């Protein structure tokens, strides 16, 4: 499953990325705050760092760990075999559930917030924000996902499929796009730009909502779903409001400059 399916999912991500970027250029929802070239260079460079980690440490991922678990018969689904469709469904549900809670922990635990804040400090929200994550955050999330794969013994194919679907949905819901009226009902079943945009608000009450990666079910169940902004939506973090903070060198050191989640709450 490490050959053409991997390449196919990579191609689908690229097509989704290009499609959303073209949509943004054709019909953007919001005017750009920072220079597009400056932001895109920094965001794509951070993505390159994440890819370097994935290439250097292939076992440090949900897929790599699932392959190891399959080879050694480790994990719940190897101890208690299930039909492929049940194993696929379980993989999607468990990874998405823990993805929701991992995201919430990123906003609660001070050290994790220092890493995750880079994703929120983007002064604009567009398709490249999807891939704007500090390498430290990428490594931390990958390690947590790997532990889940070892514990549950997810089929590697199911893990790869889930990862590909989530990446395409995340690319879509970070888009600076106007969702047509006929597509707005999607927000009942899928995380859309209309829902996720609130999560990137400057206001703590708004950025502390809508944590879901794929579906809004977990936000509904745990009381973090929010449908509308309190007023005019402002994107980013107040301590990184200037364009200067979007430079690549500043992105790398942002974890050293971030206020704690409690301080951010008090100032919003």
Image: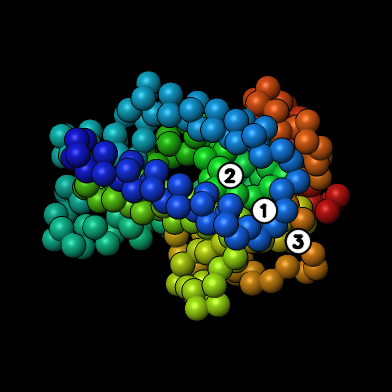
Kindly identify the residue that appears in the image at 17 percent across and 47 percent down: 78
Counting from the top left corner in percent of width and height, residue 163 is at 36, 48
Counting from the top left corner in percent of width and height, residue 20 is at 49, 53
Few, some or many residues within 10 Å of mark 2 (<14, 14–19, 20+):
many
Kindly identify the residue that appears in the image at 36 percent across and 25 percent down: 55
- Mark 2 and mark 1 lie on one chain; the one further toward the N terminus is 2
Query: CB of mark 2 within 8 Å of CB of mark 1?
Result: yes
Few, some or many residues within 10 Å of mark 1 (<14, 14–19, 20+):
many
Provide the residue designation for mark 1. Answer: 200
Q: Is residue 189 above or below residue 75?
A: below
Could you tell whether 173 is left or right of 63 in the image?
right
* Mark number displayed over residue 233: 3
Provide the residue designation for mark 2. Answer: 129
Query: CB of mark 1 within 8 Å of CB of mark 3?
Result: no
Front position among marks 1 and 3: 3
Q: Residue lying furthest front in this view?
A: 26
């Amino acid at each position: 499953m490490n050959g053409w399916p991997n390449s196919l999912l990579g191609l689908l991500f690229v097509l989704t990325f290009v499609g959303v970027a073209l949509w943004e250029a054709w019909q953007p929802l919001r005017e750009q705050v920072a220079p597009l070239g400056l932001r895109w260079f920094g965001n794509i460079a951070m993505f390159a760092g994440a890819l370097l980690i994935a290439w250097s440490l292939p076992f440090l991922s949900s897929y790599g760990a699932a392959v190891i678990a399959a080879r050694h018969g480790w994990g719940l689904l190897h101890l208690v075999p299930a039909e492929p469709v049940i194993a696929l469904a379980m993989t999607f549900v468990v990874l998405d559930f823990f993805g929701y809670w991992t995201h919430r922990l990123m906003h609660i635990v001070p050290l994790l917030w220092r890493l995750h804040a880079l994703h929120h400090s983007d002064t604009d929200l567009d398709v490249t924000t999807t891939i704007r994550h500090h390498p430290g955050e990428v490594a931390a999330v990958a390690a947590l996902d790997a532990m889940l794969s070892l514990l549950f013994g997810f089929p590697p194919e199911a893990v790869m499929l889930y990862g590909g679907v989530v990446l395409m949905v995340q690319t879509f819901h970070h888009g600076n796009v106007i969702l047509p009226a006929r597509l707005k009902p999607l927000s009942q079943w899928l995380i859309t730009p209309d829902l996720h945009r609130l999560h990137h608000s400057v206001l703590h009450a708004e950025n502390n909502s809508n944590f879901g990666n794929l579906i809004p079910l977990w936000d509904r169940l745990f009381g973090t779903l929010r449908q509308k902004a309190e007023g005019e939506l402002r994107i980013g973090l107040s301590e990184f409001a200037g364009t200067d903070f979007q430079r690549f060198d500043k992105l790398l050191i942002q974890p050293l400059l971030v206020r704690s989640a409690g301080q951010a709450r008090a100032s919003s």
